[in-house]
Image: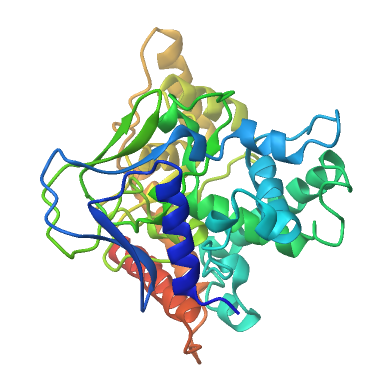
């Protein structure tokens, strides 16, 4: 059986044989997985990793690989990339041009879709509990569409399983880039995501300064600050909360300033629902989704709660003012409404906090550690807000 080092060596040789520029970096395995490191100091403004456009896994590449005779593949977006990955790993394997890249992709992931039942118990009562089920249901629907969209002659049904689809979806969620970042990709047909061998190996570090450099021939990274010799070369995945990072990538960042608690308000059963919705629309508040951070409440949360606790009489007077051409002043509704709104907020947050069960046994696994980190941060946000 091949070692990880052998697969990495073959991958690097494949990159160099096909025109990748990586003389300033080293790809090597570490105790935490494969990573990218600087050979020598990389100066600010220096390009340090480029691949030619022929190594971009675009929608066009996927469709060509999955075509059965003259039958076109009726898939787009993530299902198209997932079908390609399944075909390349489980069907074509070593005979494929893409095999050196496919072989270095992780076989296991730490996202909640791969958690054991004991590890999932750590997420009970958190927004992640429902996010995982929603994601699993979405993947089931995508998998069903993929079964319809790809010929059995291209991917046998014994390989196009839901388990393999979940693996492929994890690759896409943790490694794919939006097509807009690589708009210079030759042959791109506007699909939302692409895979970029080598460029997708760099780990996330918030606030890292890095620029994309794209032309008709290549795509790569340019350093936004000095990278010390032998230090890890990292990327910045963007402004992401720990919920996004855990669900999409399988890790959390301790003390992540972007972490938040998602709360969705619902007043659809309120007899005054239509009038209250009109008031909120006039105040330019459309979404019922709010994201609470430890450093304060989102701008629209209290205004929406004030409208939710209005009585029929309160609604009547606000509508009268609106008919006179006045915009609703949701920060000047009086002490009674303010107290009721804040009481409702405290009640909702306390209910969320009480829904978090006590942790009796933490699995000594990476998944368990990440789940506890996420859960503790959620609890901290709720307590600090209360």
x%, y% of residue 2?
A: 56, 76
Q: How was the colour assigned to the protein in this rendering?
A: rainbow
109 left or right, relative to 328: right
Q: Is residue 261 visible?
A: yes
x%, y% of residue 190?
A: 56, 24
Which is nearer the eye, 322 or 317?
322
Q: Residue furthest bottom?
A: 361
85 left or right, relative to 236: right
Q: Residue furthest top?
A: 324
Give the number of callouts: 0
Q: Is residue 287 visible?
A: no
- Examine the image and state in which quarter residue 125 appears: bottom right
Q: Is residue 201 above or below residue 9?
A: above
Which is nearer the eye, 328 or 382?
382
Which is nearer the eye, 153 or 77?
153
Which is nearer the eye, 297 or 51?
51
Q: Residue furthest front?
A: 17
Q: Is residue 53 above or below residue 128?
A: above
x%, y% of residue 55?
A: 50, 40
x%, y% of residue 106?
A: 53, 66
- Examine the image and state in which quarter residue 242 appears: bottom left
Q: Quadrant of the C terminus?
A: bottom left
């Amino acid at each position: 059986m091949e070692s990880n080092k052998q697969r990495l060596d073959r991958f690097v040789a494949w990159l160099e044989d096909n025109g990748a520029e990586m003389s300033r970096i080293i790809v090597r395995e570490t105790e935490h997985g494969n990573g990218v490191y600087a050979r020598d100091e990389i100066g600010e403004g220096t390009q340090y990793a480029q691949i030619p456009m022929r190594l971009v896994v675009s929608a066009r590449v996927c469709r060509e690989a999955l075509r059965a005779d003259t039958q076109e593949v009726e898939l787009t977006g993530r299902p198209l990339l997932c079908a390609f990955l399944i075909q390349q790993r489980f069907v074509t394997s070593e005979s494929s041009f893409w095999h050196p890249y496919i072989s270095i992709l992780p076989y296991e992931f730490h996202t909640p879709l791969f958690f054991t039942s004991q590890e999932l118990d750590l997420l009970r009562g958190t927004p992640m509990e429902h996010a995982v089920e929603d994601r699993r249901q979405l993947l089931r629907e995508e998998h069903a569409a993929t079964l319809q969209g790809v010929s059995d002659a291209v991917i046998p049904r014994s390989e196009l399983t839901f388990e393999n689809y979940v693996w492929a979806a994890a690759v896409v969620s943790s490694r794919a880039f939006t097509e807009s970042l690589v708009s210079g990709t030759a042959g791109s047909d506007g699909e939302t995501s692409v895979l970029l061998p080598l460029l997708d190996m760099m780990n996330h570090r918030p606030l890292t300064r890095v620029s994309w450099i794209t032309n008709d021939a290549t795509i790569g990274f340019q350093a936004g600050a000095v990278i010390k010799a032998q230090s890890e070369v990292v990327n910045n995945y963007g402004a992401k909360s720990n919920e996004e990072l855990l669900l999409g990538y399988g890790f959390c960042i301790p003390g992540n300033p972007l972490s938040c608690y998602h709360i969705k308000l619902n007043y659809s059963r309120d007899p005054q629902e239509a009038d209250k919705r009109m008031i909120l629309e006039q105040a330019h508040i459309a979404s019922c989704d709010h994201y609470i951070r430890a450093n304060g409440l989102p701008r629209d949360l209290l205004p929406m709660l004030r409208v939710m606790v209005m009585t029929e009489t309160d609604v009547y007077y606000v509508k009268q003012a609106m008919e006179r051409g006045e915009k609703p002043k949701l920060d000047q509704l009086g002490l009674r409404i303010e107290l009721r709104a804040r009481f409702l907020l405290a009640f909702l947050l306390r209910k969320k906090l009480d829904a978090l069960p006590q942790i009796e046994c933490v699995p000594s696994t990476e998944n368990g550690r990440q789940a506890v980190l996420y859960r503790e941060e959620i609890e901290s946000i709720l307590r600090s807000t209360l």
